[in-house]
Amino acid sequence: MEGLIPYLLHAMKKQRPHKSHRSFSAGSSRSYHLLVGGGDSFNGSSHRRTRSEFQPPNMEFLEQRSDLEYLQYSSNLRKRSVNSPSTAAGGPKLTSSHNNPHYGKRNCQCNGVSDIVIKQSPTGVRVQNKPQWNVTITNNCFCIQEHIVVTCKGFQSVEEVKSSILAKNENGDLCVVNNGLPILKGKPFAFTYAWDTQFGFRAIDTTIACS
């Protein structure tokens, strides 16, 4: 038996390759090698086996994970799209008074000429021996109102009132206020005139400008 053992060991060494390599480098910058045989002994063994601490991930697992991440991303994208204020059902849509005649009333709660309030009061000043009157035109709508037209039949004044303030039409019974420029809520338009009696101004037309 003692002579048989060296013979078997010698035969086993001849059958074993000196060194073999197995590489796992697909898709990775690291290679994973399995080294068998050769080199120094470890714990009294004539064979050394070295293996990387980590094994490369299975390709099937990577494909399943990629599919799952794509499904999660698609689901989140649909949720954001549905919940977006611009696309949600019943959400507000941008429009203008030009393509929607009810836009101003629905969004600005305007009633047109009913929101134009005209008040007059004496100033206590006399111009050419005639009392002076102060006229205040107020827009009670949150939206801008422009091109305001008022009744002004028979209007006259010894105090100059420029056409940019009141511009009469050809018949002299209607006047455009403030040269058609907008009047904003909280910023009334005012002017004065002087005559024996005050004239009755009443708004009959206006344009609501919503944005």
Image: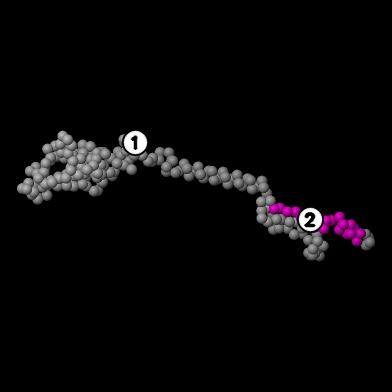
Quadrant including the N terminus? bottom right
Position in image of residue 172 (x %, y %):
15, 36
Q: Quadrant of residue 110?
A: top left
Position in image of residue 142 (x %, y %):
28, 44
**At 77% across and 58% down in the image, what residue appears?**
35
Q: Quadrant of residue 67?
A: top right
Asked whether the viewer can see residue 38, the reply is: yes
**At 34% across and 39% down in the image, what residue appears?**
96
The residue where tag 1 is placed is 99
Vertical position of residue 198 compared to residue 12: above or below: above
- Amino acid found under the numbered disc labelled 1: Asn
Q: Is residue 7 found inside the magenta-colored segment of the image? A: yes
Q: Is residue 66 found inside the magenta-colored segment of the image? A: no
Marks 2 and 1, Cα distance to the nearest angstrom?
A: 81 Å
Position in image of residue 185 (x %, y %):
25, 46
Q: Which residues are magenta?
A: 5-25
Instruction: Give residue 20's mark.
Output: 2
In what element is the residue under mark 1? loop
Check the image and name the residue furthest to the left: 129
Instruction: Give residue 166's mark.
Output: none
- Amino acid found under the numbered disc labelled 2: Ser
**Cβ–Cβ under 8 Å for marks 2 and 1:** no
Of the numbered discs 2 and 1, the one sitting upstream in the chain is 2
